[in-house]
Amino acid sequence: MKYMGDYPSKRTRSVNELTDQIFEGALKAEPLKDEIYCQIIKQLTDNHVKYSEEKGWELLWLCSGLFPPSNVLLPHIQRFLQSKKHHPLCADCMQRLHKALRNGSRKYPPHLVEVEAIQHKTTQIFHKVYFPDDTDEAFEVESGTKAKDFCQNISTRLLLKSPEGFSLFVKISDKVISVPEGDFFFDFVRHLTDWIKKSRPAKDGIVPSLTYQVFFMKKLWTNTVPGKDSFADSIFHYYQELPKYLRGYHKCSQEEVFQLAALIYRVKFEDDKSHFPTIPKMLRELVPQDLIRQMSPDDWKRSVVAYFNKQAGKTREEAKLMFLKTIYKWPTFGSAFFEVKQTTEPNFPEILLIAINKHGVSLIDPKTKDILTTHPFTKISNWSSGNTYFHITIGNLVRGSKLLCETSLGYKMDDLLTSYISQMLTTMNKQRSGPRHSK
């Protein structure tokens, strides 16, 4: 009643404070869901106060996107909506209801974005999604959109061959977190903002900024082969692999470094040679950072120009593909790298580089770039993470070995390992239950 303005409220409230109070209980207790529907319908029946009626419709719109009524109540809600066909929100409520019946109930109350949308009389919510090549596009997201549907929509719009291995990531505060594909998109963001709020209480009455950005990126590189999907190579693979290469995480030969520097230059400027004089100043954008001092800037320039001339006539897209095909030969292609401090393995350096990729978990010497060992996913029996650590057990729990790492990125390592292993198990199950050939 407060939301509908039928019950006066003296203080100003945050946009979704009242909607939280209305829906939170029902999302936790099944019987309350029907109660909420009944209350809203009751308020909308013979309500002659225009403002109150409009607010009631807003609540019905939000409610129908959160959860369906029980099978007993459903025909009554449908009859009510059919009797109100003239109302502009009616058709949309009906559609949302069918979607909720199909997709199941949400876990959290409406996100601020959803409440603001309907209060501004819009039933379409567009969300900006950022891509690794520095472009972005707006996509429609509904209350019933799950991360998997969202990924499929993006993949279709960008003409990718498949959304396999791609994921949505939400960047909020100083964290970038992958959205599980089975989660409702707005549930995930809502859960995340609530979690950040709790872990960072308001200082001096100032609530921490909870604005977030949504990214779409390749996450699992198991079946990634350069040349198989040109759009994926051009928008994602090249721009995701380039920064890791420039940070000096891969082991590579001098010849490969010259060749790759010339290709990176070509991606930037294509056949334009007018930037040659500035090569010494842009080495950080062309050469792995730990190798820059191995030669004088002018020697680098001479080598890069020589290799550039060997690749004459190649287009920007061809240069991206050549770059990827070179890196693809290395065992560290498609890795997520983590610099950690380890305390359990006396034979390894204290500061380690950990690469998680399709081969498993590799431990790398950050100075020599040598792979010290690779633990395949099949040998990893346990792992855990916290704000400051990541622990992993190799082999069985009795005779296995443990690696304890200090890192603030444990949550990312944990999620990536979980995703790769889950993908591996899904593939194994598919192979097992595949078509049986009769003898």
Image: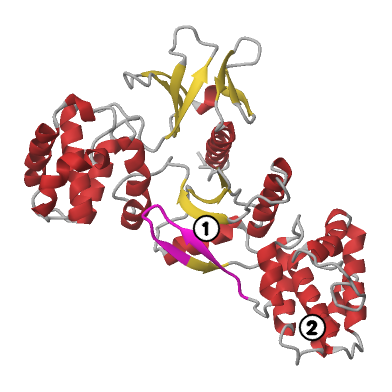
Residue at the image point whose x is 66% and y is 65% from the top: 113
Marks 2 and 1, the one that precedes in the sequence = 2
Type of amino acid under label 1: Cys
**Residue 297: % across, % down:** 14, 34
Residue 135, percent across and down? Answer: 39, 60
Tell me which segment is drawn in magenta: 124-137
Q: As displayed, is residue 376 above or below residue 305?
A: above
158 to 85, vertically: above or below: above
Residue 316 x %, y %: 21, 55
Residue 33: image location, x then y, percent: 87, 64
According to the picture, the residue beneath numbered tag 2 turns out to be 54
Q: Which residue is mark 1?
A: 151
Left or right, 103 with respect to 353, comes to: right
Residue positioned most to the top: 346
Q: Is residue 117 magenta?
A: no
Name the image quarter holding residue 1.
bottom right
Q: Secondary structure at mark 1?
A: helix
In-front residue for pair 325/129: 129
Q: Nearer the viewer, residue 169 or 289?
A: 289
Q: What amino acid does circle 2 point to?
A: Glu
Label 2 and label 1: CA atoms lie apart by: 34 Å
Residue that lies at the very extreme toward the front in this rendered image: 204
How busy is the neighbourhood of tag 1: few (under 14 within 10 Å), some, or many (20 plus)? many
Residue 127 highlighted magenta (yes or no): yes
Binning the other alpha carbons within 10 Å of mark 2 as few (below 14), some (14 to 19) or many (20 upward) gives some
